[in-house]
Each structure stands twice: as structure tokens, then as C-alpha cells.
Image (cartoon, rainbow, N blue to C red):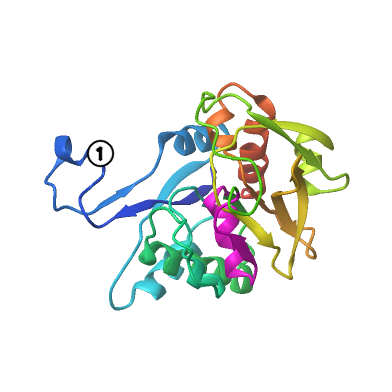
């Protein structure tokens, strides 16, 4: 049977999604997911399941129950993580913040790791969420921290814009190989301090953490990357390989 892959979604409560004027009313709330994730998971043989941001009484337990019926969870990209979630004050350099999404995804990450054996894949914001959920911190803006911009919209989303160095012996290296890996780049936050239970397994040429795995429990599939393999996956077999390895682990 094909595994059910839960994918977290973007949430807007102000009716300002660009397509909302064509599909509904300005005051409506929207839960949305980029189709790149759906296509990549389907190509890998999984069945994508959108995980809505639940609110109100019983939301936390309902979200946990939903996850317990899945075969794996993918923490997707999207809005910034609130610096207060990792014990810092914002300097005003964050983009859009969605407290409801932060709350649910941090809760679900801890639940999935502590109470289930579900495989986990994090992408872009997903890497940042799992790092914060497990006790790590973030750079609110990479340029403010002295790094060159990592938001490189001049490149098509399907094309590599820089390279990362993948560590030998890592889970990621078994999928893509150790050494240089071409990736795209669409982020302005990044990991500052890795969570105690995580280790960096890929670095950018300016020293930013681009992928993390668990330090222990190597038998479990847990990988989070700062780039967007789902966007590159239709043209790059290595990037599709990341999604496919994750989905394959969800069949076990």
C-alpha cells in the first residue's frame, strides 16, 4: 500500500492570499500548500495529505490524532518562525509571522519524535521549525548576521543557485553522495545554534547549516534541509531522491 504523507500547510487568517479574490471573499481564512510538494510526493509513490492548522478547544489532541494515522510527516516551507519561540526578541527583520502555525508545528514535531516512530522530512522553514522545537536557535536574518543573501529569486526555482558540502557518513550522503551538492536557495532565516539532539550534515560555502539529522537513532529517517528539493525534483533526480528516500522509509 502507498504510504500517507502528512504535509504541513501555510495559514492566512486575514484573507490576503493572492488568489482569494478569485476564489472566495476577502475576509476568508486560507490553508494552502504549493503543488510542488504534492507532485514530488506522488512521484515518490506516496499519497499527500494536507495537515491543516487546527485552532480552538481540542486542537492539539486532534492534530496529534491526525498524525498518528499517517505514515510520515513533512514539515514544509513558508512563513518565518517567531524569534520568541527560541527565546529572543525580534529585531524587526522577520517577515510574516503566523503564531497558530508555529504553535501547532512545534507541538507536532515534539510529539512525533517523543511518542511515535514516524519518519520526518523538514524543508526550509521545516528545518527551522524542527531545530527550534528541539531547543535550537535561529539567525533572524542571514545578511544582518554578516552573510550574503540566501534569497536568490533571480534563479528559477527549479535551478541550483549555490552548492552545499554534504558530510560523509550522513543519511543525506547515502541519498545524494558526500561532497558538493547543487541546491536552490530561498530563505533569509537560518540555524544559529543546532538543537542538542541534532547535528549539521551539510554546510553552505559561507558556513551556514543547510541540513540536519539526529545525533542518535540512526535507524530512524529524520532529515531536514534548508533548500527546496521539491521545487527542483521534476528536473533533478538527486533532489527527487531526497523525497523518494523519505517516502520509501514511510512504507516500512
Residue 58 position, x and y percent, is: 33, 77
Q: Tell me what residue is drawn at x 48 percent, y 38 percent.
A: 37
Which residue of the protein is positioned furthest toward the right in this rendering? 168
* Quarter of the rendering containing residue 193: bottom right
**Which region is colored magenta?**
123-142
Whole-percent x and y of residue 215?
A: 79, 63
From where the camera sits, is residue 115 visible? yes
Q: Position of residue 16 (x, y in %)?
A: 23, 47
The residue positioned farthest toward the top in the image shown? 235
Q: Residues within 10 Å of mark 1 (few under 14, many from 20)?
A: few
**Disc 1 designates what residue?**
18
Q: Residue at x 80, y 59 (%)?
A: 218
Is 52 contained in the magenta span? Answer: no
Up-down: is 78 above or below 55? above
**How many marks are shown on the rendered structure?**
1
Front one among 104 and 111? 104
Residue in front for this viewpoint, 72 or 203 = 203
Please tell me whether residue 77 is drawn above or below residue 22 in the rendered image: below
Amino acid at each position: 500500500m502507498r504510504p500517507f504523507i502528512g504535509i504541513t500547510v501555510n495559514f492566512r487568517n486575514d484573507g490576503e492570499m493572492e488568489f482569494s479574490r478569485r476564489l472566495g471573499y476577502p475576509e476568508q481564512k486560507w490553508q494552502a500548500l504549493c503543488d510542488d510538494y504534492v507532485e514530488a510526493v506522488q512521484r515518490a509513490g506516496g499519497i499527500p495529505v494536507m495537515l491543516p492548522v487546527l485552532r480552538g478547544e481540542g486542537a492539539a489532541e486532534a492534530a496529534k490524532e491526525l498524525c498518528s494515522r499517517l505514515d510520515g510527516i513533512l514539515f514544509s516551507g513558508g512563513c518565518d518562525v517567531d524569534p520568541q519561540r527560541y527565546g529572543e526578541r525580534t529585531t524587526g527583520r522577520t517577515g510574516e509571522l503566523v503564531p497558530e502555525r508555529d504553535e501547532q508545528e512545534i507541538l507536532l514535531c515534539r510529539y512525533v519524535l517523543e511518542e511515535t516512530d514516524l519518519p520526518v522530512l523538514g524543508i526550509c522553514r521545516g528545518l527551522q521549525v524542527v531545530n527550534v522545537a528541539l531547543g535550537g536557535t535561529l539567525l533572524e536574518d542571514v545578511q544582518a548576521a554578516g552573510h550574503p543573501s540566501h534569497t536568490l529569486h533571480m534563479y528559477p526555482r527549479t535551478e541550483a543557485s549555490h552548492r552545499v558540502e554534504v558530510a560523509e557518513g550522513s543519511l543525506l550522503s547515502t541519498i545524494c553522495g558526500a561532497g558538493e551538492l547543487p541546491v536552490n536557495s530561498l530563505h533569509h532565516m537560518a540555524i544559529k545554534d543546532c538543537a542538542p539532539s541534532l547535528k549539521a550534515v551539510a554546510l553552505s560555502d559561507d558556513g551556514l547549516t543547510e541540513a540536519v539529522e539526529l545525533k542518535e537513532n540512526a535507524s530512524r529517517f529524520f532529515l531536514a534541509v534548508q533548500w527546496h528539493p521539491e521545487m527542483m525534483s521534476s528536473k533533478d533526480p538527486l533532489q527527487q531522491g531526497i523525497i523518494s528516500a523519505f517516502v520509501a522509509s514511510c512504507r516500512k
